Amino acid sequence: MTYQRTLSKKVSVTGRGLHSGKLVTLTLHPAVANAGISFKRVDLKDQPPIKASFENVSATENATTIGTGINVVHTIEHLLGVLYGLGINNLFCEIDGPEVPIMDGSGGSFAFLLKETGIVSLNASRNFIVITEPIRVEVDDKWVQIEPDPMLVIESTIVFAHPKIKTQSRKFRFSCEDFITDICRARTFGFLKDVDMLKRKGLIKGGSLDNAIILDEFNVVNPEGVRFSDEFIRHKILDTIGDISLLGYDVAGKITSFKSGHHLHNLLCRKIIATPGCYKVISAPNQQESAVVAFALPRSMSPVAY
């Protein structure tokens, strides 16, 4: 895809927020080139739109939230992951509540909705952020890094002390087609043992077997089971794509992560932009040549740690 993209017309969807439990309607409007992705809380008076940017992330516990004060939008990562996966980089999102609908817990419903609505190209080149030097962030035993690669590659590992998960790893070399078949239908997941604690924190008020994989001490509770044997790590990759899209560019680089989450992904975005020597921003017609050149540049002996 050389050109920026948006929707061919507006479309609305209604559903419940995973954490707030509130029924909300989300309306997606086409936007002009270079507008980016932004959200407008239409249920609040005189509040400005919130740009979907890593700089506007205000919370990362169990979801990615943008905005400040009452003017916030929670759980944006699945929608953003699908927008990136389908190559949509310009959209104005109106929402009449505090949280993007969780739908079935994956990005599949959004992908179907957007493809059925129609996607159009705009008369403007896509912009890429090309990683030229490794960057790494760490918190305790969890870490994520990005290093030069001619395209977006994500290699993730998760570790859970549960017999249905244990250690899962997956490497995903991005393409729109593979995103649709391999990643976007993977659902979020949680554990029965954590339900009371999360509810005390005001979270998962809208959670159910219809929008998450739930695990008891030994098994998956959902009657239909899992969609993929490694659905858990596939969902982590969906989250990673949504979070990294907050850089505002298509990404040429390999992301490797171990037990990472929304907080680490946001730290990585901030560290990248705070380290100008580790990346270049170029337009799509020059992407292939520039990415290959970047991939051949000398790398630091060890990644920069946050």
Image (cartoon, rainbow, N blue to C red):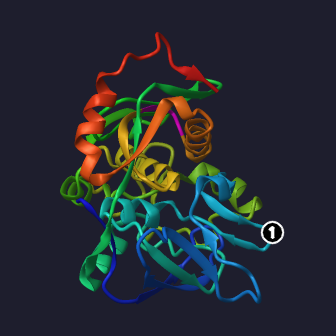
Residue density around tag 1, few if under 14, some if 14–19, many if 20 or more, within 10 Å? few
Nearer the observer, 32 or 29: 32
Against 135, is 261 above or below? below
Answer with left or right where residue 6 lies relative to residue 303.
Answer: left
Residue 10 drawn above or below residue 179: below
Residue 17 appears in the rendering:
yes
Task: Identify the magenta region.
Answer: 256-260
Q: Label 1 sits on what residue type?
A: Gly
Q: In the rendered view, does 148 fall on the left or right side of 42?
A: left
Quarter of the rendering containing residue 263: top right
Q: Nearer the viewer, residue 237 or 55?
A: 55
**Residue 86 percent coordinates (x, y):** 30, 65
Q: Quadrant of the N terminus?
A: bottom left
Residue 96: percent from left, percent from top = 62, 87
The location of residue 57, given as percent across then percent down, is 66, 56
Q: Main secondary structure of the magenta part?
A: strand
Magenta stretch holds residue 257: yes
User: What residue do we see at 40% from left, 89% from top?
Assistant: 10
User: Can see residue 155?
Assistant: no
- Label 1, on which residue? 69
Q: Residue at x 63, y 37 (%)?
A: 274
Q: Is residue 272 left or right of residue 187?
A: right
Where is residue 12? Give x, y as percent: 44, 89
